[in-house]
Structures are given as C-alpha cells and as structure tokens.
C-alpha cells in the first residue's frame, strides 16, 4: 500500500523516514483513509518499542507520514540472514525481542489499539538494537468505526490468528497469537505453519496442532516452549487473556537463573545528585565521554588454543592491542588479529569471545548496529563451541549490557562470578551495570574488589574514577585517575579525566596542566573542549575561542557531546565584544546537533533542557519555554535540568521562576561554584533571595571543603 523513503529533514537537520501511498493507491479513497488512520493510531502511542511518528504532511496533493528513521533493518532480514547461514537465534535473544514487542503491544492495547498485522517485516531495529513496531495501517481503534468491510480477512496469512483466518471479530488476543507465531519462528528457525497454497495455510492455522519446538530440539527450554504454546492456542480463551500477561512471562523467563533474582541485590538507593559542573562546561563533560570508556572495558584473556601456535600468537596480538584501545586504530587492528586467529583455528572459543568484545567496543565507538550484531554472533559462537567458556559468557553479558538489558547483564555476570569468584573483568563490568542502575553500594563494592585484586589493571581504576566522580567523591576519583596515568601515561583520556576532577576540586591550574597534556598526546574534541570550557569557567573568553574552534574542526564521528562544544563556543563569542556577532550561528549549530540526538531519544530531559537553553540564547522565547517545560516533565529530580531551567527562565525574563528552579537545583546538590561563575546569572546573584539561598545551602559547605 505504501512506499517509504529515507530522507533528510532540512529544518531540523535529521534523518527521517517518509511514508507515501503507493502510486497505484493514489486514487483510492479507502487507501487514503487507511493511511490517515495509521497516523491517528500511532499518535495515540508513546512507547520506546513503537516507531515515533513526527508528523502527517501534504505536498502536491499527496499525503505522507514522517516517522523516526530506524537504521537497523527488519526482523525479517535478520531471520533470513540467520537462515541463509543455517543458524538459529538463541532462545534468550528470541524471548528478549518478543518481550520488547509484547510490552509495546500491552501499551497499545491499553489505549485501544489492536495492531492486527504483527510479523517480522513490521518489526524494525533502532540504532541501539531495540525492536520497534511499525505499520499500523490495518490496526483497529477502539471507539472508531472499522475501515475494513465486515467479513474481510485482515493481516498477513502466515501470521494470522485463527479468528482472523476465519474473518471473525478480533481483540487483543489475536495480536497475542501473531506474536506467538513470530516468537516460534525466532526460536525454531522456521514458522509453525507453511504452505504454498493460501487455503491450506489458513486451514493449518485454524485446525492443525502447533508442533512443539522441544519435539525437534530436546535441549530447548521447556519454559519457553510452554510460553510459545500458550500464545498459539487455537481457542482465544485458552491463550493468555491479556498481552501484559504474556509480557510478564517473557520478562520472567529472560531474568531466570542461575540464582533466584531476589538473591541478587539490585535495590535503588536514594542518592544526592552530583554537582555536575561538567554538564555546562565540557571539562567535566569530558567525564561524560569517559562513561563511554567505562563501557569499553577489557581484561586480559588467559585461555589459549594449545594446538595452534600461530593462532595463539595472533590472539595474543589482538589482546595486547585491545588492552590499549585508547590508541587510535587499535580496535580495528584487534578485530583483524582475532579474525585471523579464528581462520587458523576455527574452534578457538576464546578468540570468538575476544572478537565479540572487540566488535562490542566498535559498536560503542560508532553506534553502528552492524557491530553490535557481530558482537552478539561471535559471543554465541564462542558458547556454541564451549558453553562453559567464561570468556564467552562475559562476552555475552557485555552484549546484554550494550543493548540496555541491565537486569539480564547483572544475572549473567553473577553467573560468571559463581564459577570464577576472582574474575576481575566480570567484577568491573558488573560494577558498571550497578552504577548505571544507581545501586551505589554494589557498584562501589565490586569496583573496590577489582582494583584490590588487580592493582595494575588501569581499566578498573578508570571506571572506578568515573564512578566516584559521578557521586561527588572527587578526592577518590582524583586518586583513581592518578593510578590510571601511572599505568597508561600515553592515554589522552586519562589526562582529560584527571583534569576534569581537578577542575571539580577547584584546582584550576592543575586542571589546565592535565588538559594540555591530553591535547599534546592527541588532540581529540573532548580534551580541547575541556580546556576551552576551563577558560570559560575563568572568563578567559579570548583564550577559549581558538581552542573551541579547533575542537569543532576535528573529526567528531561518534562524539555525542558536540552540541555542548558549539554552545560553549557561542558563549565565548557572546562575551567577546568583537566576536559577539558570531554567537547566534554557534548557538544555532548547537540546536541542530542536539536535535539530531533528540530524534532518537525525544524524552531525554538533559537533551531537551540543553535545546531549551540554546534557544533561549537565540531569543526564541516561546520555543525555549516549551522545551524546558517538556524537560521538567521528564526530569525526575535531575538537578542539571533544574539549573538549566533557571538559566532559561532568567534569560526569558522570569526571575521568580528562575529563583524557584535554582533553589531546586541547589537542593539537588548542584555546584555553587558553577552557579556563582555563570555569566548569565550575574544579575540574579545580586538578588537578596539568592544570597540567602546560597548562604544556607549544604552545597556551600561542600564547596568550601573541596577548596581546602
């Protein structure tokens, strides 16, 4: 019915997908009605696993829909690719994907939308590897007159429910059956029903018992087999009564073993919000970039393939390169080394595990989903060769972490530590996941164990430093990064990160020294940004300008904070009289860069508040206030968002609201150092309400202590 184009939105400078009616349907009023119906159905929905619709537009009398761009291809293409290699999707992965879709459909059903055409070609991968539902063209909306004729068969035959095949009225249990067919195909490698003739296929769906997956594969999980069979019951009343019930069973299956989940402490602890000097000024945004390093973890692998000396040599070469992944090109070289080792020893499980980790690191560097798929494939191959391979299990857990399955990753790392209690790599990665979940106690415990067991592992010290900085323990973060530099003096990131900590401690000359050391080793955008930000912090705008101009001229692929560099450059221009005319262009570029990120994460409070602040500096008052309002709705106590709200309100002439937002930021632990150095708040700080607020703030004492 439709044709989809990849396009660039020139207003917001982002890639989108445009869906038009097919030329053959242009004269069909029913097709046009269905097209608009799709837009209305999706506009009701707001779920991370449902494709976002941006707008419905018309040009030259042709209506088209504007969707988010999903670059990862369809589930259909992934299954076809696996089939061409005579491979099957691992059951855990199949269940995870099915859970994502079941969760999304639960949301759709709750607002009265039945999809009616769930199939692999209507499920697409986002950039982060998650599945999203697309194409609601034949969906049914509760309370709306149907757009299909009574008795018409709606859907794709192979994935229809029995009631669809018989043209009966359907409810959400029909979507449950269709998802069951998709889950069956993912897990078994083939659909449960197949025939070249439509009538025979529909007859199978209506009356032929579904073959059990375990019948052809005794090792297949009986629990997942039970879930599939219940979803595929012919009688709707025998299926799961609601999609949320299927989602709950899938969630439970994905989180099972080795220990009961309640034995693994994952409670959320109340935290004081960190004083994010680094959010406005890139010096500490450099530590945000260091979070990427926290993901690019690596531990020396000990197992070898004893029968092939050449493969072992290549393998060790790859290990040595990946241990120094901060050197430009080392990840690519490591991939080549591990691939060559596998060519010489095809059953070298540890080499497959190492290759998986290298591809995972490449994915985190580029956010190209092909590398995440390669990481998953090689981890699966390592475990297929040796299911007891600790390295393979760690690699598989790293993939779970990279895809955002934090609970699954925690369980997987605990499984490794149950076998190998002294595995530093597993400890370090487990600590990183706990940190992401704000479980400070467990994260701190495992970081401490890691550095105590292996004090020469620079990566454990680096991640520990990121952790301590994020939770305002600057003195320990300083010690951590000093250890990193002692072990890797040639790492630009290590000097950059230590500089960020020194800046947080108020040691500005030491911070400048470390930033310069980082740039001398290799000029990367984040290090240059940090130095320029430091100069802005000191109001040395003339010194900041050439540094920041140099930063934006460097390659920035994969650098997610380039919008902050442009914004800082705008500030440097703004407060330099003979360069002030250049500020708007820099702020406009900052807006365009942050909106590229918002295209993928439209509910990110930090990004929304960044965009709002840049718009305020451009004088776009109404848009700025709209954006900060959205940001605050999603902020959940984020003190960074409160601080930027104060800036926005002050810049747009709302002093009372600025005061209220600033009070909220200070209560959340925001740094008084930054507040008192922010040029945009010069007039506000003369207000007696601010002086009273600052004098009684607990953060004031923390600031004094940090300077001692």
Image (cartoon, rainbow, N blue to C red):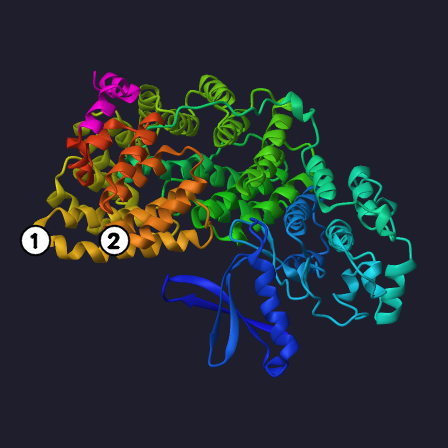
Q: Where residue 647 appears, x then y in whole percent?
A: 26, 41
In this view, 133 is above or below 328: below
Q: Secondary structure at mark 1?
A: helix
Residue 307 figure quarter: top right
Q: Nearer the viewer, residue 417 or 46?
A: 46
Quadrant of the frame with the N terminus: bottom right
Q: Where residue 264 appears, x then y in whole percent?
A: 62, 23
Residue 410 figure quarter: top right
Tell me, for residue 578, which label it has, or none. 1
Q: Secondary structure at mark 2?
A: helix
Dominant secondary-structure state across the stretch colored magenta:
helix
In this view, 705 is above or below 95: above
Image: magenta residue range:
688-708
In the rendered structure, which disc, 1 or 2, sits on the residue that comes first in sequence? 1
Kindly tell me whether residue 374 is visible in this rendering: yes
Kindly tell me whether residue 553 is visible in this rendering: no
User: Which residue sits at x=29%, y=22%?
Assistant: 699
Q: Where residue 105 appears, x then y in whole percent?
A: 66, 50
Q: Nearer the viewer, residue 473 or 307?
A: 473
Quadrant of the frame with the C terminus: top left
Q: Residue furthest left?
A: 578
1 and 2 marks in contact (CB < 8 Å): no
Callout 1 crowding tier (Cα within 10 Å): few <14, some 14–19, many ≥20: few
Tell me, for residue 457, which label it has, or none. none
Spatial distance from mark 1 to mark 2, Cα to Cα?
17 Å
Which residue is denoted by mark 2 in the rendering?
Answer: 587
Q: Nearer the viewer, residue 162 or 485?
A: 162
């Amino acid at each position: 019915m439709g044709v989809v184009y990849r396009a660039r939105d020139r207003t917001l400078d982002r890639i989108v997908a445009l869906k038009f009616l097919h030329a053959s349907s242009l004269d069909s009023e029913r097709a046009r009605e269905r097209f608009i119906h799709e837009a209305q159905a999706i506009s009701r929905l707001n779920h991370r696993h449902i494709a976002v619709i941006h707008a419905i537009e018309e040009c030259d009398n042709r209506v088209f829909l504007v969707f988010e761009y999903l670059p990862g291809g369809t589930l259909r293409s992934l299954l076809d690719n696996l089939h061409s290699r005579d491979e099957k999707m691992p059951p855990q992965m199949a269940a995870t994907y099915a859970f994502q879709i079941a969760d999304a459909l639960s949301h759709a059903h709750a607002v009265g939308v039945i999809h009616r055409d769930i199939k692999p070609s209507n499920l697409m991968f986002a950039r982060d590897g998650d599945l999203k539902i697309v194409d609601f063209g034949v969906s049914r909306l509760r309370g709306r007159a149907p757009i299909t004729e009574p008795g018409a068969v709606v859907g794709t035959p192979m994935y229809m429910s029995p009631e669809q095949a018989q043209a009966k009225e359907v409810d959400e249990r029909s979507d449950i059956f269709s998802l069951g067919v998709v889950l069956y195909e993912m897990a078994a490698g083939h659909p449960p029903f197949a025939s070249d003739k439509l009538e025979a296929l529909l007859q199978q769906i209506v009356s032929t018992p579904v073959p059990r997956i375990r019948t052809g594969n005794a090792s297949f999980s009986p629990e997942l087999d039970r879930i599939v069979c219940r979803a595929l019951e012919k009688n709707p009343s025998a299926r799961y009564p609601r999609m949320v019930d299927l989602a709950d069973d899938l969630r439970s299956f994905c989180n099972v073993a080795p220990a009961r989940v309640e034995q693994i402490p994952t409670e959320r602890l109340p935290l004081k919000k960190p004083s994010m000097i680094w959010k406005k000024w890139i010096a500490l945004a450099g530590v945000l970039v260091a979070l990427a390093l926290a993901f690019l973890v690596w531990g020396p692998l000990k197992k070898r393939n004893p029968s092939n000396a050449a493969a072992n040599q290549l393998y060790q070469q790859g290990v040595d390169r990946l241990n120094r992944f901060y050197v430009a090109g080392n990840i690519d070289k490591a991939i080549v080394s591990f691939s060559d080792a596998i060519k010489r020893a095809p059953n070298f499980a540890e080499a497959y595990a190492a290759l998986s980790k290298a591809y995972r690191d490449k994915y985190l560097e580029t956010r190209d989903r092909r590398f995440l798929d390669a990481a998953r494939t090689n981890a699966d191959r390592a475990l297929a060769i040796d299911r007891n391979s600790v390295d393979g299990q760690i690699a598989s857990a790293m993939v779970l972490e990279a895809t955002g399955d934090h609970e699954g990753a925690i369980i997987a790392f605990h499984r490794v530590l149950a076998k190998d209690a002294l595995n530093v790599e597993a400890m370090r990665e487990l600590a990183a996941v706990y940190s992401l979940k704000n479980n400070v106690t467990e994260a701190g415990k495992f970081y401490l164990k890691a550095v105590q067991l292996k004090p020469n592992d620079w990566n454990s010290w680096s991640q520990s430093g990121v952790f301590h900085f994020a939770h305002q323990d600057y003195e320990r973060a300083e010690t951590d990064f000093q250890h990193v530099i002692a072990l890797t003096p040639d790492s630009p990131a290590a000097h950059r990160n230590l500089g960020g900590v020194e800046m947080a401690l108020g040691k500005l000359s030491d911070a400048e020294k470390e930033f310069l050391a980082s740039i001398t080793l290799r000029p990367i955008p984040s290090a240059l940004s940090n130095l320029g930000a430091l100069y802005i912090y000191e109001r040395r705008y003339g010194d900041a300008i050439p540094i920041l101009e140099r930063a934006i001229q460097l390659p920035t692929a994969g650098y997610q904070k380039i919008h902050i560099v442009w914004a800082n450059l705008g500030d440097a221009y703004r407060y330099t009289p003979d360069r002030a005319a250049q500020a708007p262009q820099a702020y406009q570029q900052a807006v365009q860069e942050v909106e590229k990120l918002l295209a993928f994460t439209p509910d990110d409070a930090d990004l929304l508040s960044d965009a709002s602040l840049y718009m305020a500096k451009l004088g776009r008052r109404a848009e700025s206030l709209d954006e900060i309002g959205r940001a605050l709705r999603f902020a959940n106590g984020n003190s960074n968002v409160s601080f930027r709200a104060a800036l926005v309100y002050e810049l747009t002439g709302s002093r009372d609201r600025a005061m209220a937002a600033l009070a909220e930021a200070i209560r959340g632990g925001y740094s008084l150092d930054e507040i008192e150095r922010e040029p945009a708040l010069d007039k506000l700080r003369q207000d007696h309400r601010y002086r009273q607020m600052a004098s009684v703030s607990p953060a004031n004492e923390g600031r004094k202590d940090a300077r001692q």
